Image (cartoon, grey):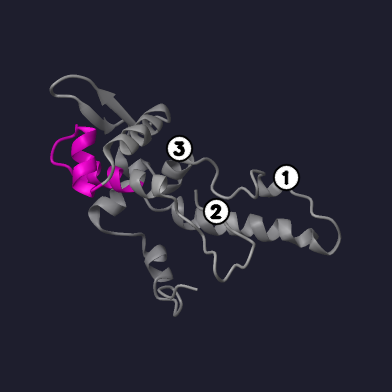
Amino acid sequence: MAAVTCDDCHNRPVRVTAKVDYAVRALVELAAAPSPTVKGDRLAAAQELPVKFLENILAELRRHGIVSSQRGADGGYRFARPPATVTVADVIRAVEGPLADVHGTPPEALDPPGAAASVRELWLATRAALRSVLERVTIADLAAGTLPADVIGLLDAPDAWARR
């Protein structure tokens, strides 16, 4: 899950789990495949991912209606809906849950007392910022090697490529 950490923020950035990374990579591979149905082990091999872990991720994506599966010699995974309608946010929610919970609580449910009351709005704004990118980028965009112009514009920020 993409999660904002509040302890020592300069050393603990927003994190993308292996589960999210593998899910997105497998779906991009599936979208770019010449046939609409691809076996899980082929997706895993193409992206150098652990097969069992990826099969579990694909099962979660199937439960959330992102992919469907077909058994048999011609079986495998296919998109349950067009890749152009599947956002990265959809994928994260399917495999990890909400985009920005704070200790398992949605930011709008927080009520910090006293001087820290505005922290709730900080976490709400952070969630909105994540959504502004993750809900705009689709699996089809990634498979095509393109991003929406406003998302590409974020890469022009002087510190976009700096890890800090």
Q: Which residue is mark 2?
A: 3
* Residue bearing mark 1: 109
Judge by depth and name the residue closer to the eye, 18 or 118.
18
- What amino acid is found at the position of numbered circle 2 in the picture? Ala
Left or right: residue 17 versus residue 38 is: right
Q: Is tag 3's residue or tag 1's residue first in the polypeptide sequence?
A: 3
Secondary structure mostly taken by the magenta-highlighted segment of the chain: helix
Query: In which quarter of the view is residue 81 placed?
Result: top left
Picture coordinates of residue 97, whole percent (x, y): 52, 40
Q: Residue furthest bottom?
A: 158
Determine if the magenta segment contains residue 39.
yes
Q: Amino acid at mark 1?
A: Ala
Residue 102 painted magenta: no
Q: Position of residue 74 (x, y in %)?
A: 14, 24
Q: Which label was assigned to residue 94?
A: 3
Relative height, residue 115 to residue 22 (above, below): below
Vertical placement of 23 versus 121: above or below? above
Q: Residue at x 23, y 54 (%)?
A: 144
Identify the residue at image location x=39%, y=49%: 18
Q: Which residues are magenta?
A: 24-48
Left or right of 103 on screen, residue 63: left
Decide if residue 5 is on the left or right side of residue 95: right
Total labels: the figure holds 3
Q: Secondary structure at mark 2?
A: loop
